[in-house]
Amino acid sequence: MSNIPLPVRRVAAIIGILVLVFIVLEFNRRVEQLKTLDGQYALMQMQATQAIQTQGALNTQVAFAGSNSAVEQWARVDGHYVQDGDLPVVPIGQPGAPPIEASTPMPTPTPMQKWEVWYQLFFGQ
């Protein structure tokens, strides 16, 4: 066959196997990097789509804000203005009647069980 001594063939085979192992490991590293980059690409596409949709919604709001209907809506709701032909109604109270005060009910505290107190003592914020 060949005139190459046996130890040289073994060394060449071992070197060849090592090179093959390094090539496979490098290939696996690149495949993992590709998966990571594909995930980042999908995330960036999603964020870009959301940004474009947000921009469209904001452009719609800007167009509405510059329209006459937005001004009229603000004047009637927030500005409390009336239009010609409207009959404004202003409620007034009875003369001498005390003003109505809105009272907020106080919430009743719920008693805690002993184990809840100890739990809050050790693990609570």
Image (cartoon, rainbow, N blue to C red):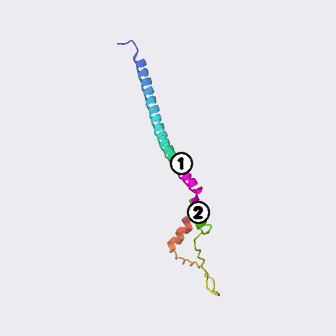
- Residue 77 visible here: no
In the rendered image, residue 24, in percent from the top left (x then y), is placed at 43, 31
> Residue at horizontal 54%, vertical 64%?
123
Per the image, is 76 magenta? Answer: no
Looking at the rendered structure, the kind of residue marked 2 is Glu
User: Which dot, 1 or 2, sits closer to the camera?
Assistant: 2
Q: Observer-nearest residue: 119 or 28?
A: 28
Camera-nearest residue between 19 and 93: 93
Q: Residues within 10 Å of mark 1 (few under 14, many from 20)?
A: few
- Measure how far apart labels 1 and 2 are at the Cα level: 30 Å
Which label is found at residue 72? Answer: 2
* Farthest residue, direction left: 1
- Report the magenta residues as a range: 53-68
Which tag, 1 or 2, sits closer to the chain's start? Answer: 1
Residue type beneath disc 1: Ala
Looking at the image, which residue is at 57% across and 53% down? 63
Q: Of helix, strand and loop, which one carries label 2?
A: helix
Kind of element beneath mark 1: helix
Quarter of the image where the C terminus is located: bottom right
Overall secondary structure of the magenta section? helix
Return the residue at label 1: 51
In the picture, measured across the screen, residue 66 lies left or right of residue 37, that is right
Residue 55 sits above or below residue 18 on the image: below
Give residue 25's quadrant in the image.
top left
Point out the residue furthest to the front here: 85
